[in-house]
Image: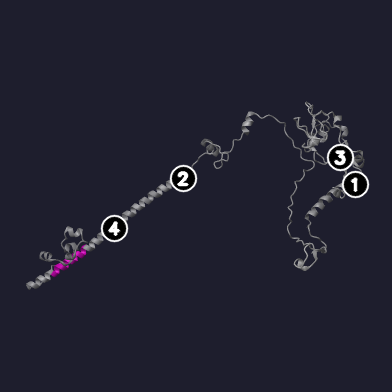
């Protein structure tokens, strides 16, 4: 310890008890000696029932008393130091009424004009406490007051304009030339051919990095809220009054019932949901255009049905006419085949008998049905089933003709 103490400075404060020698007390510049507990009448251990330490001196140099069950702060340790509050003392004017001037002027300048009374809004001549003798022209300020006010106003304006000019000026760009670089020589700790390229010392050149004047600022500037104007607008409030039951009922707003969100998981009945939906408030009205639309659709459907029925009748008539024409064409073909068959049979019979065949006379102007005998019902009803024998004839038809 002796080797270390010789390098340390002398202590500024020394603490000692009564048993400390007088030589140590004389050497110390500032000495703090413990107080004698007997002078403060501190009860001994075991006799402290009903005794409460109230001051710091009651603790002496020791700590708390464990046998006393209460909050103790020896030497102020553990005590929470509350912040200084902003509460103001209550003030009363000359008439005994509460004065709120201190509350209104809190945080403002001393020479700032603040109107805190209702009479400040009333003209001077209409006040009750106005005296006619006071109705005099106010004196003009002297030259010294005008000079001081002018100088104060000038300084305030210069301060405002200087702040705005400095805010708009470009920061970080020096108008003059760049500073000259600085050279630093240093010796590395590791020496040898394998370190520092074999050099024993190095010289470092330190220079300022150029700043781009067009670079956006890196610090985000936040605008402060403007202070209230001087004097502030007086806020007039009506005296408080109790709410009636009707007013409370009017101001009772029911909670919102959503059909999409139910964060708290409340069970809401369906009638409440429908009432909150606002459907009962709305009056249901059907537009007349819906009836017109339905009538138009019905009439269009009936017209379309009529047109479809007429079209089907026309198609049936055309199909019937086509079928009759086809039957007539087949009948004519069968008639012509019979005539040719009959003519060929007559020629063959004449050749066998040795006579000359004379065809029967036929009236060209007569209808085909008059020239030829009408066929049997079977042949007329089924013209498409006629076979080759009907067209070319057979032995029975030859004998019949």
Write down the quadrant of residue 389 in the picture: bottom left
Q: Which residue is mark 1?
A: 147
Q: Is residue 180 found left or right of 319 in the rendered image?
A: right
Comparing labels 1 and 2, the label whose residue is closer to the camera? 1
Q: Is residue 398 found left or right of 304 in the rendered image?
A: left
Comparing labels 3 and 4, the label whose residue is closer to the camera? 3
Q: In whole angstroms, how far apart are the C-alphas of marks 1 and 2? A: 87 Å
Q: Position of residue 393 (x, y in %)?
A: 15, 66
Magenta residues span 331-344
Helix, strand or loop for disc 1: helix
Residue at 20% of width from left, 59% of height from top? 382
* Contact (Cβ within 8 Å) of mark 3 with mark 4: no
Residue at 40% of width from left, 50% of height from top? 300
Q: In whole angstroms, how far apart are the C-alphas of marks 3 and 1? A: 62 Å
- Is the stretch drawn in magenta largely helix, strand or loop? helix
Q: Which residue is mark 4?
A: 319
Q: Which residue is mark 2?
A: 290
């Amino acid at each position: 310890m002796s080797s270390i103490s010789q390098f340390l400075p002398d202590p500024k404060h020394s603490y000692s008890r009564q048993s400390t020698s007088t030589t140590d007390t004389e050497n110390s510049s500032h000495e703090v000696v413990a107080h004698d507990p007997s002078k403060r009448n501190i009860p001994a251990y075991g006799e402290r029932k009903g005794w409460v330490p109230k001051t710091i001196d009651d603790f002496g140099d020791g700590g708390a008393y464990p046998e006393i069950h209460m909050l103790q702060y020896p030497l102020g340790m553990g005590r929470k130091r509350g912040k200084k509050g902003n509460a103001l003392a209550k003030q009363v004017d000359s008439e005994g009424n509460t004065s709120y001037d201190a509350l209104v002027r809190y945080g403002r300048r001393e020479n700032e004009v603040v109107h805190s009374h209702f009479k400040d809004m009333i003209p001077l001549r209409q006040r009750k406490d106005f005296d006619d003798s006071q109705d005099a022209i106010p004196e003009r300020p002297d030259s010294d007051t005008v000079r001081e006010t002018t100088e104060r106003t000038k300084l305030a304006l210069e301060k405002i304009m200087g702040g705005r000019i400095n805010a708009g000026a470009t920061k970080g760009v020096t108008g003059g030339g760049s500073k000259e670089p600085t050279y630093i020589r240093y010796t590395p700790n590791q020496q040898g051919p394998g370190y520092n390229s074999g050099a024993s010392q190095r010289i470092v050149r330190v220079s300022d990095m150029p700043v781009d004047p067009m670079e956006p600022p890196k610090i985000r500037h936040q605008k402060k809220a403007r202070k209230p104007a001087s004097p502030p607008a007086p806020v007039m409030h009506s005296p408080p009054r109790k709410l009636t039951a009707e007013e409370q009922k009017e101001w009772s707003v029911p909670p919102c019932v959503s059909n999409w969100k139910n964060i708290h998981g409340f069970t809401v009945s369906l009638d409440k949901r429908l009432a909150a939906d606002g459907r009962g408030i709305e009056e249901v009205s059907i537009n007349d255009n819906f009836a017109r639309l339905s009538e138009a659709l019905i009439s269009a459907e009936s017209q379309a049905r009529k047109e479809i029925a007429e079209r089907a009748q026309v198609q049936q008539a055309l199909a019937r006419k086509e079928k009759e024409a086809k039957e007539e064409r087949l009948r004519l073909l069968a008639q012509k085949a019979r005539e040719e068959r009959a003519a060929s049979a007559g020629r063959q019979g004449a050749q066998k008998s040795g006579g000359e065949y004379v065809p029967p006379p036929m009236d060209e102007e007569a209808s085909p049905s008059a020239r030829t005998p009408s066929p049997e019902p079977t042949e007329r009803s089924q013209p498409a089933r006629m076979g080759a024998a009907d067209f070319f004839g057979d032995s029975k038809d030859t004998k019949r003709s």
